[in-house]
Image (spheres, rainbow, N blue to C red):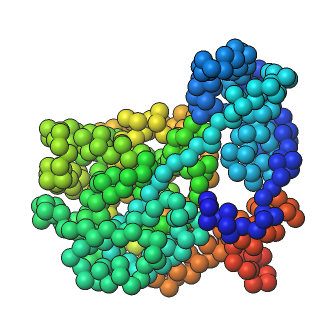
Amino acid sequence: DLLLAEQLPAAGGLPSQSCKILDSATGQIMPVYRFRIKCAESDGIFWQSGRLVEEHLQKLQSPSEETGLGDVVQVVAALEKRLPWYYCLSPSCFSLAPEDRLALLWSEQVHKVCAGCGKFTEQLPAPKAFRAGVTLIARSHAGDLGLMFPWLRSVELFWPYWRWPVILVLDSESRRDHWLALSMLPSWVKVVLEPEPSGMKHWPKIAHTGSTSNMGWMRAMHTHFWYDSLCSTEFVAVTDVDTILHSFVDEEVMFDEDGRPRLLGHTIAYFPWTLLAIGMPPGLEFMAHLPLVIRREDYLPFRQFLATRLGFEVDPADSASSFDHVFAELASRTSANCTVHSTDEGDAVGGDCLVCYQTLHGAFLYEQRHSRYAFHIMHEPGAYGAREYSVWRTSWGTAQPKRPVIHDSCPMISYGSHFTSWQGIKLKKLGLKKYLEKVTEALGAALCNIKAAVVFCRGAEGADLVAHLMPEEPEGTCGHTKLHGD
């Protein structure tokens, strides 16, 4: 934030007067769905108070003995009775910093319940906007250098790396990986050189397209289960180097109003065998939208859950050596459950026979930690029959999942995409040159859309910010970007 503050022009800020409150209500007066419809009809953007406002009001309910302001308690009680607060805001309100916008709405609410509150305003400070610590982590190797460059460029453009760390995990025994770490990565990337897992020789050998050996995939999956040991932030953002970010990332995009990480999933079965290996029904996948943001404290319960499901005693020390046995058993059961299918090209592959960390952890969080995350599940009615390997099979022994409940189906802004498959095209199969062409086009389209969004929100006042956010645009570029409409 300090870095941005130094770089932004002095005139880059937006006066709060530009933010217009188009409508407001409370949950006591109007159902949320009706208010949202009204707001959409007036071209406004919906805002709702969340857990942070509730907790702030609870703290204000106990003023210090020195103040002795009973009026404060009465005002706070009146504010609590109005919860939740609904607002319909003009788009320019979302160009304000989150704390400035929250302070504006807080002040509006305070004056609604207490016209003469000016005398003790200092005892009614606005709540702080939600702030989080997030570490972005990817697992790769020098052979993926071609994929790494566009990934790093998208992170540089859209990830706040000056306050949220970026970690890349490589193989410690590889000289090529050492040279990559030394000479080809920006200074803001922290490299972890990981030794080969001791139990790797016991993993099953499974065919996998795009790799000369299945061990690379399996080793990367094994590393994923220990990301919590690589960082100290409250949240871990799990990603791959064939993922690109295409929108700016901050707390408001990655978390809901209660500070819960947003997880975007799909009702499809890409990796059914890895879920069946631990007795969980297939049907939810979390691989298409990355990064996958997970509370760091939810890693240990996840490893313990896997151990229990696979018949192992939970290791109180949570040692890597004991989990190696759990992982080997998980890989063996996944392989045993799987049969090799044919793709549209007729190649015999077993990609869905592999352990998939994202599928497993996403399913665990949905079942075991549901209230701690905000789920955004895209339901595609024909998804189970879309590809041969995703057709629902009665032999799986589980019921086909039903449509997700409505509160788990709300749309969210997708700020990152797994670029292995883009618009139904398997880009990596077309070669690195085609992959780089498409990624470059997508990043260009993202920047063009950001420019359009800033102009929409700020009008003429946004010119300085546009100049700061994106490189100078060659004349006519944005108008001719093929993916612009997408």
Q: Quadrant of the N terminus?
A: bottom right
Above/below status of 372 relative to 209: above
* Spot occupied by residue 317 in the image (x, y as percentages of width and height): 17, 43
* Spot occupied by residue 384 in the image (x, y as percentages of width and height): 45, 50
Q: Is residue 96 left or right of residue 380?
A: right
Q: Quadrant of residue 477?
A: bottom right
Regarding residue 451, the answer to whether it shows in the image is no
Regarding residue 436, the answer to whether it shows in the image is yes
Q: Quadrant of residue 369?
A: top left
Residue furthest to the front in view is 66
Closer to the camera, 378 or 109? Answer: 109
Picture residue at 75% right of the left edge, 29% below the top = 121
Above/below status of 169 relative to 359: below
Closer to the camera, 157 or 292? Answer: 157
Picture residue at 61% right of the left edge, 72% below the top = 442
Count of labels in the image: 0
Picture residue at 43% right of the left edge, 70% below the top = 189
Q: Quadrant of the C terminus?
A: bottom right
Q: Quadrant of residue 108?
A: top right
Picture residue at 79% right of the left edge, 69% below the top = 464
Closer to the camera, 340 or 15? Answer: 15
Closer to the camera, 14 or 136? Answer: 14
* Spot occupied by residue 97 in the image (x, y as percentages of width and height): 70, 51
Q: Is residue 315 left or right of residue 264?
A: left
Q: Is residue 165 left or right of residue 106?
A: left
* Spot occupied by residue 363 in the image (x, y as percentages of width and height): 38, 43
Above/below status of 318 relative to 475: above
